[in-house]
Amino acid sequence: MATIPDKAFPDYDSPPVNEVVCGIQFHPLKAMTLPYVGLLWQKFRSRYPNCREVAPLVPAIERFDEQPVENLNPFGDTFPTPRIWFETGDGNGLIQVQRDRFLHNWKKERPEDEYPHFKHVITRFQDCLTTFEQFLQENKLEEISPTQYELTYTNHIDVGLGWLDLSEIGGVFPDFNWRVSAQRFLPVPEAINWQTIFTLPERAGRLRVSIRRGKRLSDGLPTLLLELTARGITTDPSRLAMWSWFDMAHEWIVCGFTDLTSDMMHKNIWRRKR
């Protein structure tokens, strides 16, 4: 599961990254009831002062050797508690906790916010996960038993940056070109939703790529949403292997992004440095 040296990764002055999520799924912590989550917040509150409840995420596991089965009760025999958000005052940092997940997000909240790069994002996740595990130990709760790792990059490519309508999408994503011809019966699409899946090395998971048309929350203008999610796990349960998996997932996302997008966008819009 070797990765290329960091210095060889593609790098951009102005990448379109809007959000990065680092996360770990694990067997449900049955003893971690909501009062414990309130105590956990005290560990993070000085840096993450805002708290709210949202709907829990359904487990998502990449499988290769088992036939998929419809799960009518995805949370098993554990009562599903809400997912709790701890958020920084500026909105750029977000911790998500539920009985079977722990995630950390970096989010772009304002146009001037700059993506701080992977080293910063993964370090924040590592630090927060360590605090969470120490909390479990202090309160004599179950240890984390991982079932899946996840790294997601969401990119927003706004209208006017290399494209004006979906007939020009090939200028952004050369593999998904829309053929323009006066003889065509179909008009330019109103919406798109492409999904592509790649197997990671040694079947350590999958890279799932989706491209769809969306709208900016700030003003409703069109944007292309490019989401790359690496999800999987290693056969080695050690933390060293876990962080190695995240390095490999980062490589596949960064190099996959570069493969899927055009040289014109690299040079003229995002200003590729290497």
Image: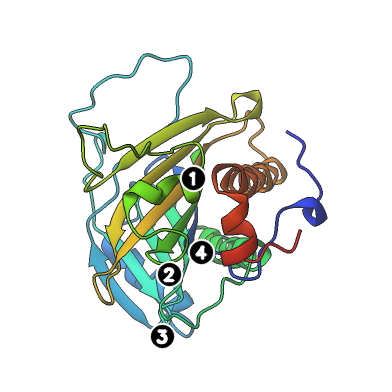
Corner quadrant of residue 193: top left
Query: Viewer-proximal residue, 49 or 162?
Result: 162
Q: Residue at x 25, y 45 (%)?
A: 188
Position of 231 with respect to 38 (left or right) is right
Report the Cα–Cα distance between label 3 and label 2: 10 Å
Between marks 4 and 1 in the image, the one whose residue lies nearer the viewer:
1
Q: Which residue is mark 3?
A: 89
Report the Cα–Cα distance between label 4 and label 2: 19 Å
Report the Cα–Cα distance between label 4 and label 1: 14 Å
Which of marks 2 and 1 precedes in the sequence? 2
The answer to whether one can see residue 29 in this image is no
The answer to whether one can see residue 231 in this image is yes
Q: Which residue is mark 2?
A: 94
Q: Residue at x 74, y 64 (%)?
A: 273
Query: Viewer-proximal residue, 143 or 175?
Result: 175
Position of 233 with respect to 192 (left or right) is right
Q: Which residue is mark 4?
A: 16
Give the numbered dot on residue 173: 1
Query: Viewer-proximal residue, 197 or 60?
Result: 197
Corner quadrant of residue 66: top left
Q: Secondary structure at mark 1?
A: loop
Position of 245 with respect to 76 (left or right) is right
Between marks 3 and 4 in the image, the one whose residue lies nearer the viewer:
4
Residue 73 in picture, x, y percent from top left: 20, 33
Q: Amino acid at mark 2?
A: Leu
Q: Amino acid at mark 4?
A: Pro
Q: Residue at x 30, y 68 (%)?
A: 216
Quadrant position of the C terminus in the picture: bottom right
Corner quadrant of residue 40: bottom left
Q: Secondary structure at mark 3?
A: loop
